[in-house]
Amino acid sequence: MTYVKLIRISLFFALFVLAVFIFFISGNPGWIEKNYASGFFQSLASILRLLFGWMPFSLGDIIYSIVTLSVLWQIGKFFVRLFHKTDSWTKKLSPLLTAGLILLFVYVYFYLFWGLNYYRKGIEHQLALQNSKFDKQQLIDLNKALLTEVNAAKEFCLQKKDTVMSRERMFHSSIEGYRELEKKFSFIRYRHMSLKPSMFGKIGNYVGFMGYYNPFTGEAQVNVRIPNFLQPYVTCHEMAHQIGYASESEANLVGFLAATHSNDTLLQYSAYFDMFLYAWNNLAAVDTTAAKELGKQLHAGVKRDLKTYSEFAKAHRSFLRDFTDAMYDYYLKRNRQRKGIDSYAEVTGWMIAYRKKYEPTSP
Ligand SMILES: [Zn+2]
């Protein structure tokens, strides 16, 4: 057995053992919450942000590109060798094994260094929320409250002629929002900024992502090619992923709380806008008339942004979008998010529970 072969086999077994460990540990949310999500992961993610946050470009995007190209290269090599009559089957299959090894490594790395957060107890447990089912009246109340907030924030920004947010301001206001939130909930702690514009923004518009977290480098990427008023909330959402809230509904809630605790009204507006859309869509699903009535009460400026958003979505509709939506839906369902892509909207339930507990006097 050659030296290289020995290393490959040992690596495969080591990764396999780790994959089995991940499988068993994922069934123990209590252990994960205490030792992983609130312990090991927090230190690891802080170190990653400290190491790579200062780089002006996204190292994670480069790593993603290299990994994707390496796998494609190995698959290509396999097909070329397949038609080489002189090559033995061991030689033919070798690139496939290498590709498999790379993918297994990515799988293990992903779960050990972030993905296990999908299996934690999470924000419901930390905030002691009771996310019981909500009724229509509660949904209407939430819609009304968010409508008031989104309208007020828009009016305030328009009066100050403050409508576009620079990238620097967006990132710094988001950090400030997290610092304010930490004063209320000490377990929500964000240190060492690592926020970058995504290198794949243009593709992102067609594929349908607004931002993503990179577990390899701890960086959060924001798609800066989407409408400006959406970007600040996306930034706060991705930052929630960075501090261990893997589930989409949890990242939505934590991101919303951070954004609305900031003193920057444009950042608040972005969060209220998005959250209103979730709540409004939920309402439209159960009572179209009530949703339409509320829609009429939106500020003219908010209506303009809604139009911009829907035109943007229409202009970037593609077959790729359906495909990636289906893939991501499957991925979320595999990671304990029963409702798949609809789990983003589960935040409505969290919002109702949160307001009931922490803001009982608000309208
Ligand atoms: Zn997300």
Image: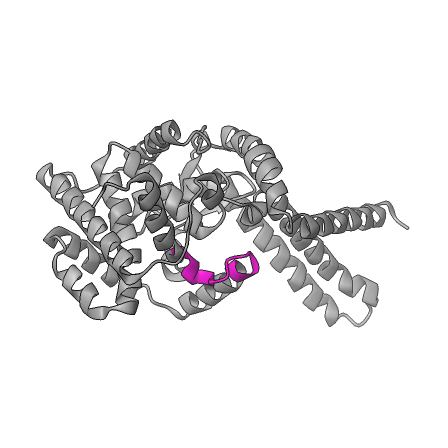
| Count of picture labels | 0
Name the quadrant containing residue 317: bottom left
**Span highlighted in magenta in the image:** 332-344
Which is more toward the observer, 223 or 339? 339
In the image, residue 326 sits, relative to residue 279, either above or below, namely below
Q: Is residue 168 left or right of residue 212?
A: left
In the image, residue 54 sits, relative to residue 133, either above or below, namely above
At a point 67% along the width and 58% down the height, the residue shown is 74
Please identify the residue farthest to the right as the structure is shown: 1
Main SS of residues in magenta:
helix
At a point 43% along the width and 47% down the height, the residue shown is 250
- Asked if residue 199 shows in the view, the reply is no
Q: Position of residue 327 (x, y in %)?
A: 50, 64
Q: Position of residue 99 (x, y in %)?
A: 68, 57
Q: Is residue 339 magenta?
A: yes
In the image, residue 311 sits, relative to residue 224, either above or below, namely below
At a point 64% along the width and 47% down the height, the residue shown is 28
Which is more toward the observer, 60 or 351? 351
At a point 35% along the width and 58% down the height, the residue shown is 134
Q: Position of residue 186 (x, y in %)?
A: 43, 29
Name the quadrant containing residue 94: bottom right
- Asked if residue 260 shows in the view, the reply is yes
Q: Is residue 264 magenta?
A: no
